Image: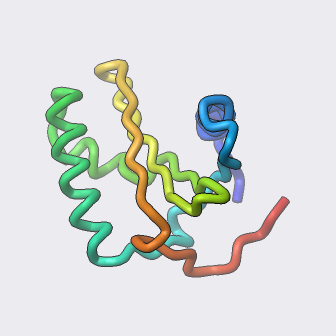
Amino acid sequence: MQIPMRQEYIRKRLQVLRPEQRVICMDPENLALHQEAAKVLEEASKHVASEAGVPVSIIHDRLFQYVFRLEPSGNLLLVLSVPERDVEFNVELPPALWKITTPEKRA
């Protein structure tokens, strides 16, 4: 998986903010969400759209733009960037709400 420069920048910033966790870039194509996760993400999308003052469709389009796994917690962290409003939000999903669908290749 080739990591875009912006995603790597966000990963490094998150790593500084969460020194107790290892922040790992994830390919959203290799993830499966449980049904409950969809409900959580729908509510988060509405909240983020309301806070950022943008339509929910914009948030839906960007929901999996920057995806990270936190270790050792196993949480999935979605970073929602809304540069039009100069804001960024994080949505964290516990490991019970998602799983990896294909084996990862570690660098």
Q: How is the image coloured?
A: rainbow
For residue 10, what is the image quadrant? top right
The residue closer to the viewer here, 96 or 79, is 96
The residue closer to the viewer here, 96 or 33, is 96
Residue drawn at point x = 67 percent, y = 30 percent: 16
Q: Position of residue 57 (x, y in %)?
A: 20, 47
Q: Position of residue 1 (x, y in %)?
A: 70, 59
For residue 53, what is the image quadrant? top left
Residue drawn at point x = 49 percent, y = 68 percent: 95
The residue closer to the viewer here, 25 or 60, is 25
Residue drawn at point x = 45 percent, y = 42 percent: 79
In this image, 22 relative to 89: left or right?
right
- On screen, residue 87 above or below 21: above
For residue 19, what is the image quadrant? top right
Q: Position of residue 36 (x, y in %)?
A: 27, 72
Q: Position of residue 64 (x, y in %)?
A: 43, 54
In this image, 98 relative to 3: left or right?
left
- On screen, residue 31 above or below 5: below
The residue closer to the viewer here, 12 or 29, is 12
Residue drawn at point x = 60 percent, y = 54 percent: 70
- On screen, residue 85 above or below 74: above
The C terminus sits in image quarter: bottom right
- Total number of numbered discs in the rendering: 0
Residue lying furthest right: 107
